[in-house]
Image (cartoon, rainbow, N blue to C red):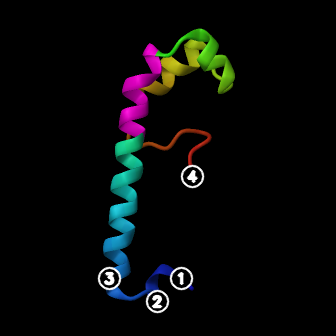
Amino acid sequence: MSRAHEPHLSGIAILRRWLRRWTARRRLGHDLPFLTDETLADVGLTRREALAEARRPFWQAGACDD
């Protein structure tokens, strides 16, 4: 079913989902620079990639997001 056919209240649910996702991205962007190199390696990021991701605006999805 497309979003156009969902009931009106689901629009609120979609908005809440976006807000939760944006909050998580913002928190992650804040925390990434403080992770250790070992932790970053565990998640498959280099220090350079982590810093680049931290500078990305929270409303822009990363390559692995969604």
Q: Are marks 4 and 2 in contact (CB under 8 Å)?
A: no
The label number, if any, that marks residue 9 in the structure image: 3
Image-based side of 27 in relation to 38, left or right: left
Q: Which range is magenta?
A: 25-34
Residue under pointer 2: 5
Label 4 element class: loop
The answer to whether residue 26 is magenta is yes
> Which mark's residue is nearer the viewer, 2 or 3?
3
Residue 58 visible to an observer of this rendering: yes
- Tell me which label, 4 or 3, sits earlier in the chain: 3
Q: Vertical placement of 7 versus 18: above or below?
A: below
Q: Residues within 10 Å of mark 4 (few under 14, many from 20)?
A: few
Give the amino acid type for the residue marked by disc 2 in the picture.
His
Q: Residues within 10 Å of mark 2 (few under 14, many from 20)?
A: few
Q: Are marks 4 and 3 in contact (CB under 8 Å)?
A: no
Residue under pointer 1: 2
Image-based side of 35 in relation to 44, left or right: left
Q: Vertical placement of 3 versus 34: above or below?
A: below
- Residue 12 falls in which quadrant of the image? bottom left
Q: Are marks 2 and 1 in contact (CB under 8 Å)?
A: yes
Question: From mark 1 to mark 4, how far is it between C-alphas?
Answer: 18 Å
Count of labels in the image = 4
Q: Residue at x 36, y 36 (%)?
A: 26
